Amino acid sequence: MSLPSHVRLVEVGPRDGLQNEAQPISVADKVQLVDALSAAGVSYIEVGSFVSPKWVPQMAGSAEVFAQIQRKPGVTYAALAPNLRGFEDALAAGVKEVAVFAAASQAFSQRNINCSISESLERFAPIMSAAKQHGVSVRGYVSCVLGCPYEGEIAPQQVAAVARELYAMGCYEVSLGDTIGTGTAGATRRLFEVVGAQVPRDKLAGHFHDTYGQAIANIYASLLEGISVFDSSIAGLGGCPYAKGASGNVASEDVLYLLNGLGIETGIDLDALIRAGQQISTVLGRPSGARVAKARNAK
Ligand code: HMG
Ligand code: MG
């Protein structure tokens, strides 16, 4: 299969990245990050979550962040919603796109959202109908697609079953999350072969955490399988509060460097993206997790 000519990068740093930070980050710093990302040409930004503040305290200010960002035309500003309450809060904050999140592993589903996989899908049904009524698009996530911190190996067929359900209930796209970053390129190709038989490949995305340093290889493997949407995180921020040891998502800067090298269009300016990553790294008081940013800085 030939490589796609265009890739959409879904920037999850302000959400998947920052949700894992223990230190308080001000609304102003979050807003500055989102605005720096849109200024760099990022067309899709996951800004925050409307989840229980007891579960993920860092996302508690998401409504304020949405109120203060400068919405650039053509940019999608999205938020996670785990239940109808989250959806309604998102709607009240002016959110036009939400993401629901399920898992391919029962144990992870319990730890992350306190219910079984089938209960989670039942919870999403009223979100789907409310979203339709309000003209809100819904993206779906499946976590633990290449391994679970509690259950170990996960069969691709298990992932396919959950992805198919999310797609059937109206998610326009389903992002497959390697939450703990254990996947390798061969397993990634096999995953998309199996899931791609149940959900059209142009409705699938890849979401790779870089815990084992495999994310860039896995993205290349996904490109070879015809996948053209990838989630990534500025400066490689993040992890998952319910997957101990999970490091950040693959750094957006590193993914962009790969795609630029392959001549694949994204609309994002690498220098501006690196600056956005440096800005948030300064706020967090640590060096950027993006290899490309480190290499540029060393010059
Ligand atoms: P629960 O405790 O079972 O829910 O949590 P509940 O309905 O019994 O409610 C408990 C309390 O939470 C109540 O408050 C509710 O009002 C409140 P209390 O009476 O105790 O004061 N509550 C809410 N508050 C704000 N917003 C809401 C909301 N819902 C209930 N939407 C629940 C269930 C789903 C709420 C909880 O487990 C939760 O919020 N989980 C979120 C976990 C999370 O955000 N994880 C990280 C994101 S997923 C991820 O990172 C993976 C991904 O990146 C892909 C990948 O890498 O694989 C997407
Ligand atoms: Mg994630």
Image: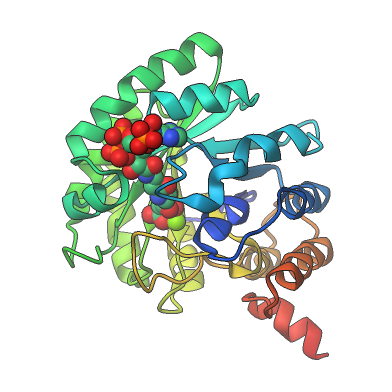
Q: Quadrant of residue 73?
A: top right
Locate residue 242 relative to residue 89 in the image: left or right: left
Q: Tell me which image quadrant ligand 1 sits in.
A: top left
Q: Residue furthest top?
A: 133
Q: Position of residue 242 (x, y in %)?
A: 34, 59
Locate residue 283 relative to residue 111 in the image: left or right: right
129 shown above or below 99: above
30 shown above or below 243: above
- Quadrant location of the C terminus in the rendered image: bottom right
Q: Nearer the viewer, residue 175 or 16?
A: 16
Q: Position of residue 221 (x, y in %)?
A: 43, 65
- Residue at 40% x, 22% y is 127
132 shown above or below 151: above
- Residue at 50% x, 51% y is 57
Q: Nearer the viewer, residue 200 or 256?
A: 256
46 shown above or below 291: above
Q: Position of residue 200 (x, y in %)?
A: 37, 37
Residue 81 visible within the image: no
Residue 203 visible within the image: yes
Q: Nearer the viewer, residue 80 or 233?
A: 80
Q: Quadrant of residue 240?
A: bottom left
- Quadrant location of the N terminus in the rendered image: bottom left
Label tally: 0
Colour mapping: rainbow
- Residue at 22% x, 48% y is 110
